[in-house]
Image: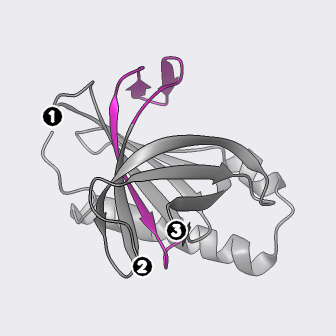
């Protein structure tokens, strides 16, 4: 049985080896066969990641895919509709277990501004991971798919700034 919209969820960010890095609460927005969308409040210290600024209280609309090698966070200033940009993690496909969602981060990140300029971050960290070659290849394909979606203005990068 999948959770209902508005239901609380807990996100578990795991490293590439399955160890929990941190967890945080969210609320379900939408569930589908291939993904789950939730809303969460950014509760960490202000941080600049590439050209994207994240501040305490920012609203994240997070899409976790069960069949893709990434998750996508649309970042909004506070509770407003002002899009700050997108923060994308290259990950193994997410797992949903009851009201718990698990995402294994593979270090590569894609940061996108509302104007759709973009930057890949943490390539060296990804290259240093001791992961199976098949996972490395899937992660690279996931990143290439993201760039294709971005360049074509396709979801999830179809929001107006």
Helix, strand or loop at disc 2? loop
Image disc number at residue 113: none
Q: Alpha-carbon distance for marks 2 and 1?
A: 32 Å
Task: Locate residue 71, reporting x and y percent.
Answer: 47, 59
> In the rendered image, which residue does mark 1 sit on?
81
Residue depth check, mark 3 versus mark 1: number of the one nearer the observer: 3
Tell me which residue sits at (26%, 56%) in the image.
157
Q: Are marks 2 and 1 in contact (CB under 8 Å)?
A: no
Task: Locate residue 73, reporting x and y percent.
Answer: 39, 48
Tell me which residue sits at (82%, 75%) in the image.
132
Part of the protein shown in magenta: 41-69
Image disc number at residue 98: 3
Q: Alpha-carbon distance for marks 3 and 1?
A: 30 Å
Q: Residues within 10 Å of mark 1 (few under 14, many from 20)?
A: few
Tell me which residue sits at (41%, 20%) in the image.
55
Q: Nearer the viewer, residue 57 or 26?
A: 26
Tell me the quarter of the image containing the C terminus: top left
Helix, strand or loop at disc 1? loop
Tell me which residue sits at (73%, 52%) in the image.
15
The number of callouts visible is 3
Q: Residues within 10 Å of mark 3 (few under 14, many from 20)?
A: few
In terms of sequence position, does the residue under pointer 3 or pointer 1 come before the other?
1
Task: Locate residue 48, reporting x and y percent.
Answer: 49, 23
Q: Alpha-carbon distance for marks 3 and 2?
A: 8 Å
Image disc number at residue 1: 2
Helix, strand or loop at disc 3? loop
Q: Is residue 84 above or below residue 18?
A: above
Task: Locate residue 57, reporting x and y percent.
Answer: 36, 23
In terms of sequence position, does the residue under pointer 3 or pointer 2 come before the other?
2
Residue depth check, mark 2 versus mark 1: number of the one nearer the observer: 2
Tell me the quarter of the image containing the N terminus: bottom left
């Amino acid at each position: 049985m999948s959770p209902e919209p508005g239901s609380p969820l807990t996100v578990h960010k795991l490293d590439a080896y399955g160890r929990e890095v941190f967890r945080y609460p969210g609320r379900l927005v939408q569930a589908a066969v291939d993904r789950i969308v939730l809303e969460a409040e950014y509760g960490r210290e202000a941080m600049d990641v590439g050209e994207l600024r994240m501040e305490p209280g920012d609203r994240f609309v997070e899409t976790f895919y069960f069949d893709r090698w990434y998750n996508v966070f649309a970042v909004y200033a506070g509770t407003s509709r002002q899009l700050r940009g997108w923060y994308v993690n290259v990950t193994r496909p997410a797992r949903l277990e009851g009201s718990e969602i698990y995402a294994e981060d593979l270090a590569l990140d894609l940061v996108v501004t509302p104007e759709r300029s973009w930057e890949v971050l943490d390539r060296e960290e990804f290259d240093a991971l001791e992961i199976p070659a098949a996972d490395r290849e899937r992660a690279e394909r996931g990143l290439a798919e993201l760039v294709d979606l971005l360049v074509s203005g396709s979801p999830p990068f179809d929001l107006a700034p």
